[in-house]
Image (cartoon, rainbow, N blue to C red):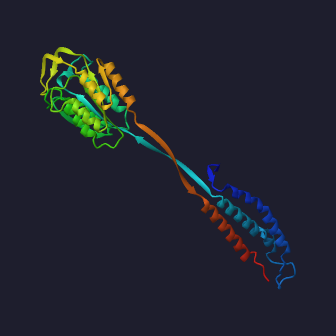
Amino acid sequence: MNRFHGIDWQNPWVFWLLLLLPLFVWIGWKSRARAPRMFHPGFPRGFHPRAGIRRRISSLPLWLRLLALACLLVGLARPVIRTPWSEDSVNGVDIVLMLDVSTSMQIRDVSPNRIEAARRIMADFIAGRDRDRMGLVAFAGHPVTRCPLTTDREVLRDLLDSTSNQDMDDGTAIGDALMMAGNRLRKSMTKSKVVVLLTDGQNNMGAMDPLAAARVLATEGIRVYTIGLGTEGVFEQEFKLPDGQVVRGKVQSDMDTRTLSAIAATTGGKFWRALDRGALQKAYAEIDRLERTRISTRTQWEVHERFRVWAFAALVLSLLAWTLEATVLRRVP
C-alpha cells in the first residue's frame, strides 16, 4: 500500500491511466478540426456578434472533460485517510492489603513505630500501582474490611491513614483475616489475585486456622505474600489502648515465622522477615516487581474514504462543460 502526503491509495495502478490523457487531447482536437463550421444565416459568413468570446473559450469544454476524467481516475485510485488510535489492553492485578493493628504494632523497634512505618510504606506501594484495584483488611482480635477493591487511591489512602484497633479486641486473628481477604477477591475476574499479609505476631484469636485458610485461598487461585515485621522479645513502653487510653507497660512480641512461611508456600507466594524499616521497604518493593500489571498496546486505524470528493468534482466539471456547450457555445444550424 502506497502512502503520499499522508494519504493512502488503495489502487495506485490507476494512475498509469493518466498517461492516456494526452491521447484524449489529440483525439479531441482532431474531432474539432473535422467538425463542419455552421454560420448564422442573418450575418455575413464568418461573422458572429460573440465570435471573440466563443473563440477564446471554444476549447474549454474539452479541457473541463479531460479534468473531469482525471478527477474520476484519482477517485478510482481510492484515496483514503487513515487516523491511528491506540487501544491499551490492561491485564491488572487485584490486591488486598492486610494490616495487623494489634497493640504490639505500636512498639518502636521500627521507626517511628511499627504501624506508622507500615502505613507510610504501604501508602507508597499504593501510589505506585495506579492501574490495579486494591482493598484493605485490618485485623487484631478480629478482621474488618476497611476498603473493598477500588481504583480510588485517595479514598484508599485516607482509610489506611485512619485505620486503628479502635473498637476491636486485641489479639491476632490471622486465619479469620485471610478468609475475609479471600472473600474480597473471590469474585475477581483478573488473572492475578494477590493478598499481602503484614503482621508482627502469631495467630492467637479467631476460629480459622491460618494454614487451613491458606489452602482455601490457594484453591481460589489467590497468592499470599507474607511479611513478619519487627523483632521478638518483651518491650516496655507507652501504648494506646483500643478505648483511647494511654498506658505504660510490658508487651510480649512473638513471631511465628514457620506459619507465615507455610502460608506463602501453600499459595505460591513468598515470605519476608523485616526487622527494620529498610527491610520492610524492600519487601514491598519486591512484591511490586513480582506482581506487575501487564499492558499491551494495539494500534487501530480508522479509515476515511475520499472517493466521493473526486467523483463529485468530476460530475461538476462534466456538468459545466455540458452547460457551456448548451448555452454560450451552442452551435446554431
Q: 226 and 288: which one is in front?
A: 226
Residue 239 is drawn in which quadrant? top left
Q: Residue at x 62, y 49 (%)?
A: 6
Compared across the picture, whether 147 is left or right of 319 comes to left
Residue 185 is drawn in which quadrant? top left
Query: Percent position (x, y) of residue 74?
Result: 67, 59
Q: Disc count in the image?
A: 0
Residue 103 is drawn in which quadrant? top left
Residue 135 in view, yes or no: no
Compared across the picture, whether 240 is left or right of 183 comes to left
Query: Percent position (x, y) of residue 32?
Result: 82, 72
User: Is 239 above or below relative to 304?
Assistant: above
User: Is 283 above or below relative to 146?
Assistant: above
User: Is 189 above or below relative to 68?
Assistant: above
User: Is 79 above or below relative to 107?
Assistant: below
Q: Residue at x 62, y 52 (%)?
A: 8
